[in-house]
Image (cartoon, grey):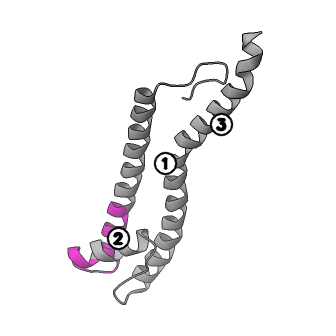
Amino acid sequence: MFEHRSEPLLSRTAFLKRLVRHGGLALLLILGSLILGVFGYRFLEGQDWVDAILNASMILGGMGPVGELHSVAGKLFAAFYALYSGVVFLIVAGVLFVPVFHRFLHRFHFELMEPSRRK
């Protein structure tokens, strides 16, 4: 997926394309998680669509639920969805950060190895 340390540094255009691909993957993860949350609140807690979107968005964004939960199934879903959302946050941060971190390490390694290649 990423270039080997012996390969040259990726061009700026190719790197930007990589960032866009990773951003798209992160967006898909967020949208899929949001859809999961909306359906959970809608069908397990019985909230209307707008309230379900609001609660799922707030939990996924780390803010917490807005409305009060009434059913046992809804409360259990909210607990597991909150834990799931925390994991999704870490995964999305990793997906977005990895290309930048890899480029930094690749450039650092490339600069260290460059003088030895000149000999």
Main secondary structure along the magenta-highlighted residues: helix
Alpha carbon distance from label 2 to label 3? 35 Å
With 58 as the anchor, is 116 left or right in this view? Answer: right
Q: Earlier in the sequence, mark 2 or mark 1?
A: 2
**Total numbered labels placed on residues in the image:** 3
- Label 1 amino acid? Leu
The reply to whether the magenta stretch includes residue 15 is no
Q: Is residue 21 above or below residue 111?
A: below
Is residue 114 visible from the viewing direction of this image? Answer: yes
Find out whether the residues at labels 1 and 3 contact each other: C-beta distance under 8 Å. no
- Label 2 amino acid? Ser
Q: Earlier in the sequence, mark 1 or mark 3?
A: 1
Q: Is residue 22 above or below residue 37?
A: above
The residue shown at (70%, 20%) is: 114
Q: Which residue is mark 3?
A: 105
With 57 as the anchor, is 116 left or right in this view? Answer: right
Q: Residues within 10 Å of mark 1 (few under 14, many from 20)?
A: some
Quadrant of the image containing the C terminus: top right
Start and end of the magenta stretch?
34-51
Q: Is residue 45 above or below residue 107?
A: below
- Classify mark 1: helix, strand or loop: helix
Q: Which residue is mark 2?
A: 57
Q: Which mark is residue 96?
A: 1
The residue shown at (36%, 90%) is: 68
Alpha carbon distance from label 1 to label 3? 16 Å
Residue 12 in percent (x, y) is at: 44, 29
Residue 23 in percent (x, y) is at: 40, 45
- Classify mark 3: helix, strand or loop: helix
